[in-house]
Amino acid sequence: MATVVDADAGQLRRILERSSEEGSCIRNFPADGEGGEINFPAVKSDLVVVSEDGSKTICVNMDSEAVVLDTATGKEVSKFGKDISHVALSPLGSFALTWARYSLAPGENLCAWNVATGERIAKFSQKDYLPKKWPTIQWTDDESLAGRTVKNEVHFYDGDKVGDVKFKVAVPKVDCFAISRGRAPYRLATLAPDTSSEPGKLAIRKLPDGELVSTKSLFRAEAAQFSWSSTGSAALATVTNEEDPTGQSYYGETNLFFLDASGNLDQRIELPRAGAIFDAKWAPRGNPQFIVVYGSQPARATLFNTKCEPIFDFGQGAWNCINFSPHGRFVALCGFQSLSGDVEVWDRNTEQLVGAAKMVHTTSFSWSPCSRYIIAATSFPRLRVDNGYRLYEYNGTLLETKDFDKYLLQCEFLPAASGVYPDRPASPRSLELAKKNAEGAKGGDASAKAQPYRPPAARQGADPVGFVRSRSVRVAPGKVNAAVWKSQKTAKGAVVPGANEEEPKALTASQKKNRRKKAKKQEQKASEEAEKLSNSTDAATGEGDNVTALQKRLRNLKKKLRKAQERKQTAETPEQSEGAQSVGTIEKEIDDIEKKIAVM
């Protein structure tokens, strides 16, 4: 497929490509006609890791050694370690962290290294590899500090002297932490999970003294993922619990909290749509804002400012992840994994839709460093079939495709240092193409397609009460009205006929105990009243039987009287009227029985 690219200041974008049949290489995009490919040695690790500025690449070779390469030339910078399974780089690429199986290197399976010299600067013991907590040693953006959790404490070191404790911050029962981004002074975000006797605790602390800035107690908090804004002014904490006590979600319970670094605001983010929180991310540059994708599918996406106020709603779509471009201008709302691959690209600055595409079977998504191109790859081991990649322009135009007979292991754009590529707005041509691509991504004109069967009550124009649920009403993109947002947070959805108006709330242990006591007392009281009623009934059995028989006879006679009156009124001939039982006879018998009952 022909490729049309407008190079920024003569800069070529580079793509890292790894496959089981062609090996590992870095190639230019677009091809410059001079070869330009850099071949890598055969690697063993699941991923080749690239530094944030794209200058260094680190991988694990077939001998389980960590190899650092200069990305521009492909030359080896250093080699270190043995029996390595996982590797990570610090923000500036000056230090590396490696982990090996504990049985192969007991007592020193977690090591920190100087990338330039290959010298080991620290060693620790870590029995298990935990993907959600990796890397377990975190450096600040300028690499002046590094932190690591130990029992009830977080230890901090000089960035180049990991192993020599500089200061400690006491955090009882700490499970995970995150150091703020940006410049000093730094903040520390931590989570202490809840126990059977104590609630969990989210906290923000100052460094280095560990003074509490803000804290929030919460129940059902087993784990958390922290995300700091690019300036370090605030953090998002996605708190998860494996079990949902309400039974509404098979995947557990998720809550999102906003924590201000100055302590002015810490709150749970109340969202107007019930369901899971799929993703929450800060813009990497520019105005510090964040986006949340939430709710039952089709999910809803909303843009918030640093005061945790909603400012723009992207509407609804089959989305479950957020991918910001490196400049933070464009944001791709994507629906991958179990979803159908719908992708919409929005300009965050102008709040306009600038692109859309259908990227089915995508397992990895990568922006180019110029924020103009996208690679959507289908790779092993997530999928074993249809491995390959598609290269798109940001407006959704397909530029290049490549399929692999066997396995594609990794394919992504290499990052570049800040300032290499300018932040360019969407072109007018892209805005026109965006509408066309959006229609193509949704399957074209919906009116021309065969429509699925719908029962009469659900067809156009029919809207019986209780049939149309609130979640079927799509939210249109646009500015968020604060008053409407607040009303949506407290509004109840439409009730399905026959269902309860409200979902049952989860009860605490003490509430359950009190309810059991109350139910037991009510049972005892009911049994006592039943026993008293039984005794009084036995005492008046003889007289009661006679009264009951007369009452039964009276009911039957009244029924006969109504039927006789109806037949008399509807009789068409004299013979039919004479054949009906005399109404007067029945009325006389009713009067006699009523007199007997009154006397008794």
Image (cartoon, rainbow, N blue to C red):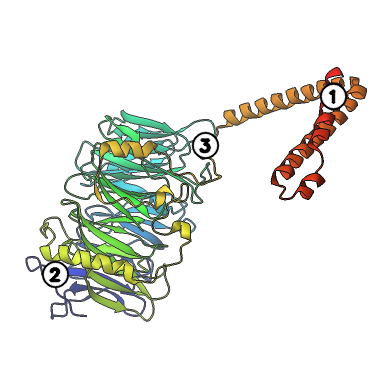
Mark 1 or mark 2, earlier in chain: 2
- The vertical placement of 591 against 365, above or below, is above
Q: Which residue is mark 1?
A: 534
* Residue that sits furthest to the front in the current view: 574
Marks 1/3: CA distance? Answer: 40 Å
Residue type highlighted by circle 3: Lys
Mark 1 or mark 3, earlier in chain: 3
Q: Quick one: 486 or 328, which is closer to the camera? A: 486
* Residue that sits furthest to the top in the current view: 599
Residue at 24 percent of width and 44 percent of height: 181
Q: Quadrant of the C terminus?
A: top right
Q: Quadrant of residue 151?
A: top left
Could you classify mark 2 by the number of other residues whose Cα lies within 10 Å: few (under 14), some (14-19), or many (20 or more)? some
Residue type highlighted by circle 2: Leu
Q: Position of residue 299 (x, y in %)?
A: 37, 53
Circle 1 or circle 3, nearest the eye: 1
User: Looking at the rendered structure, which numbered label has been put on residue 12?
Assistant: 2
Q: Quick one: 380 or 551, which is closer to the camera? A: 551
Residue type highlighted by circle 1: Ser
In what element is the residue under mark 2?
loop
Residue 269 visible in image: no
In what element is the residue under mark 3?
loop
Residue at 39 percent of width and 38 percent of height: 491
* Residue that sits furthest to the left in the current view: 9
Q: Quadrant of the N terminus?
A: bottom left
Q: Quick one: 105 or 251, which is closer to the camera? A: 251
Residue 441 visible in image: yes
Q: Position of residue 321 (x, y in %)?
A: 34, 56
Q: Which residue is mark 3?
A: 505
